[in-house]
Every structure is written in C-alpha cells, then in structure tokens.
Amino acid sequence: MTTKRPNFFYHLHPPTLPARESRFGYTFGLGGISLLLFLVLGVTGVLEMFLYVPTPAGAAESVRQITYLAPFGWLLRNMHYWGGQMMVGAVALHMARVVLSGGYKGRRFNWLIGMALLVLTLLLDFTGYVLRWDQDTAIALVTGTNLINAVPGIGPMLYRLVIGGAAVGQATLLRFYAWHVLGLVSVAAVLIVWHSFRVRRDGGISHREPAPGPASRVGREQLVKTELVAALLTLVVLVGLSVAVDAPLGPAADLTVLAAELRAPWFFLWIQELLRSAPPFLAGVLAPLAVLLLLSVLPYALDREQAGVGEWFNRPGRAAQGVFLAVLITVIALTARGLLR
C-alpha cells in the first residue's frame, strides 16, 4: 500500500497549523492572491511581448493591434492591465492586515522585504503604464522624470540616467521596457521567493500560541482548499472585470504637445495632489520617501514587543497601527480628491 505524497502547494505550509489562523477571515488570502496576480501578469505580459514594438513610432500602434486585431487580444490586454491594478490593491491590503494583526512580530526583516515588494509593484505598474505610450502616459512620464531632475545636486545626473539622455525619447522607452519585462520582474521574483521562504521557515502564517489539545490545530489541506477557492474567485473577478471594462488607450503620444493638466496614474494621484500645494522636490520626492521610511521602521521604532502576535488591533502595537492607519487614510483621501477633479 502506497501513501499519497503531498504536492508542491501543500509543502508551502507546515503539516499542521492553528485552526483560527487557517480560516479565510484571518488573512483573506491576500498574500496568495498577490502571488497569483503576479503570475497572471507574467503570463499575459509574455504573450503581449510577441506583438509589442518598443519604439516611439510603433508602441501605441502595436498596443492597438493587440487590442483590436489579435485574436482575444482585447481580453489579454485587459487582464494584464486590471491584474496590475488589482495587485497594487492586494499588496497594500496584505500589508495592512500584517500591521493590524501584529503579523510582523518576530518577523520584522520580512516586513522590510514586503516593503520592497510594494515599491517594486508600484514601479512595475508605472513602467507598464508608460509602455502604452499614449498622450496620458506621456504627461505622467515627463512630469515624473522632471521630479527627479528637481533633486538638488544629483538630480540632473539621475534624470539622464533614468531617461537615457537629455530628453524623453527612444532611449527612455527602451529603458522602461527593459526594466518592466526583465529588471524589475527579476528582482521581484527573487524577493517573492525569499519572502515566501521566510514565512514557511518561521512556521507559516503568523499566529498566537494555540490552546493545548489536537482540536486547536488543523491539517494544511484545509488551508490549501481555502486558498484554491480564493484564487478561483480572484480569477473570476479579474476575467469579469476584463470583459466588462476596457483598459484605457488614448491617442499616440506627442511629446511636443503636453496638456496643462497633470493626470497621474491612480496609485500616484496622492502625490499629484501634494504637488498642487507644495514645491516639486518636497511633494514629489521627499514626501514619498518619508512615507516609505516611516512605514519601513514601524515594527522597529513603534512596536518592538513580541506580545500580541496574531491578534487584531493588539494593544502593544497600537502606536504602529495608528501611524499606519493615519498614512493610509491620508493617501486614500488625497487619491479620492484627485479622482474627483
């Protein structure tokens, strides 16, 4: 008689885990959903590469060919676009869950890896946004790179390094294309594996000590089934959204004619709102860096206690939770104001 060996997905989790932490309502499957969306973006992105032309003259036209001429190209492009937007949301919500439930306690370095993955997710979304190379993306690209130019001292050097010359053009598009399909993806893939390995090594999902007795623990099979249902529901939502709502696509970029009104991608609208009332270097460079630094040091500066792990809104972590929620609410409020303009 042979015993059935667990498959790869079972090995991602310890053989048993606390019953409370195995429920969907504890993690909402946000880590697994983020990973699934990353894989979906990889598959759809590779397929788009067969038709995409990374030149100023051909980029927008090739996107139109993918959308209107390639068989099911509209669905492919929509899934890639909406998958990127959903991944930004999933990663942000995952980090919120970790903070509010004390999931970083005892795993503080993994929080820093998660912060790096958040930054990479935003950069991947922005570089993909630029590759559309229509008039909206041109405005965002020129404005965003001009913020780099505003950095005192090293700004002009960084500006030329990012755009590949004295002005946005062919070299800029090629650099953003290379970063989007290879550079950022490679780094993100390594960090995702590292992040997942550290979670598995530390005993799986962060949890408080369960009550003694076998009834307090369940096998990993239940968690895998829950994650499978969450993955299927995520795919249903993604496909449904992709069928119902087309990804935006405007006229081809003309860098000689830029609109007076800045329109950043939605995940950077909060920075756009800050730019309306503060100098470019302060609002576009120092403020985002300050937010990232503040979030990175939360588990080190505001909550060094081990007590409260796995407990929603635990008392030792109130300061870290308060700062995180204040930052989150501010970003959401500024984003909403930008969307309503």
Image: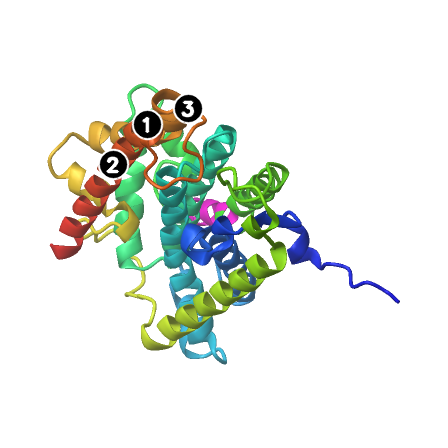
Report the side of 318 relative to 308 (left or right): left
User: Which of the two labelled residues, at mark 1 and mark 2, occupies the earlier sequence position?
Assistant: 1
Indicate the position of residue 106 as horizontal and vertical percent values. Answer: 50, 29
- Which is in the foreground here, disc 3 or disc 1? 3
Q: Is residue 36 above or below residue 20?
A: below
The residue depicted at 41 percent of the width and 55 percent of the height is: 25
Pick the residue in front: 246 or 93.
93
- The answer, for residue 169, to whether it is visible in the render is no
| Magenta highlight range | 169-179
Q: The residue tagged with tag 3: helix, strand or loop?
A: loop
Placement of 273 over or under 251, stated as above or below: above
Q: Earlier in the sequence, mark 3 or mark 1?
A: 1
Q: Residues within 10 Å of mark 2 (few under 14, many from 20)?
A: some
Q: Are marks 2 and 3 in contact (CB under 8 Å)?
A: no
171 in the magenta segment = yes
Q: From mark 2 to mark 3, how far is it between C-alphas? A: 22 Å
Q: Which residue is mark 3?
A: 305
CA neighbours of label 3 inside 10 A, class few (<14), some (14 to 19), many (20+) = some
**Residue named by callout 1:** 294
137 is within the stretch colored magenta: no
Q: Amino acid at mark 3?
A: Glu
Q: Nearer the viewer, mark 2 or mark 3?
A: 3
The residue pinned by badge 2 equals 327
Measuring 28% from the left and 48% from the top, which residue is drawn there?
Answer: 140
Indicate how the structure is coloured in the image: rainbow
Measured along the vertical axis of the image, is residue 71 above or below residue 23?
Answer: below
Q: Amino acid at mark 1?
A: Leu
> Which kind of residue does numbered mark 2 sit on?
Val
Which label belongs to residue 284? none
Q: Real-space Cα distance between discs 1 and 2?
A: 9 Å
